[in-house]
Amino acid sequence: MSLRIAPVVLKGDAVRLEPLAAEHAQGLYNRGRVKADWAYLPRGCFVDMADTRHWIDEALATPGQLPFAIVETARERVVGSTRYLAIHPEHRSLEIGWTWLGQEWQRTAINTQTKLLLLSHAFERLGCARVEFKTDSRNQRSQQALLRIGATREGVLRNHMIAQNNYLRDSVYFSVIEAEWPEVKARLEDLIGRAAPTG
């Protein structure tokens, strides 16, 4: 297998990931207006529909990324977004990031299923040797969630990037490598099986 990234629809029991498009703007705006939800992302929450459309346009225009809309299938509602980025075919590696969900869907099986779909596609279809995640060192909830699914904490890049309000951010890196994928997949499937219904 070779790591050839192309737009794709990924389907699970409760969630569908589809290539981000202009038609998702209203749903994303409806879910993405809570300031606290964007505290650790590179930019703040959506302020209006024009801002949301601009964010979509930027995501689609950024080289080396594949952004998705997260759709809750039970109610066919757009509930958030995620993407592949830092794609390095020569090293068979990529990053999963820019993940956010509306408040109603945070800490539900939707996020877990999203990670399962993205990781399954990365390892089983794209042939990745490594999938990485990075998070703001202040974001303890994200770090705990990554440890919970079985990702390995690798270390901290100090003063890694300038975040919102010119904050000089330290980034914590996590990864899953191909040898660990069967165990991580089993853990994700177990977490989804034990989760309460989301709809």
Image: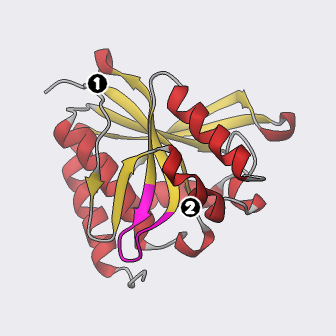
Q: Earlier in the sequence, mark 2 or mark 1?
A: 2
Q: Residue at x 25, y 25 (%)?
A: 4
Residue range (magenta): 70-78
Q: Nearer the viewer, residue 84 or 67?
A: 67
Q: Residue at x 38, y 58 (%)?
A: 114
Would residue 10 be found to the left or right of residue 112 on screen?
left
Residue indicated by mark 1: 92
Placement of 4 over or under 41, stated as above or below: above
Would residue 70 be found to the left or right of residue 4 on screen?
right
* Residue 138 visible in image: no
State the image coordinates of residue 177 (x, y, percent, origin top left). Answer: 30, 38
State the image coordinates of residue 164 (x, y, percent, origin top left). Answer: 80, 40
Amino acid identity at mark 1: Arg
SS at mark 2? helix
Q: Residues within 10 Å of mark 1 (few under 14, many from 20)?
A: some
Q: Nearer the viewer, residue 170 or 30?
A: 30
Residue occupying the far right of the picture: 165
Residue 42: name its quadrant.
top right
Does the magenta portion include 161? no
Q: Residue at x 36, y 53 (%)?
A: 17
State the image coordinates of residue 52 (x, y, percent, origin top left). Answer: 66, 47
Quadrant, the C terminus: bottom left
SS at mark 1? loop
Residue 59: name its quadrant.
top right
Amino acid identity at mark 2: Gly
Residue indicated by mark 2: 27
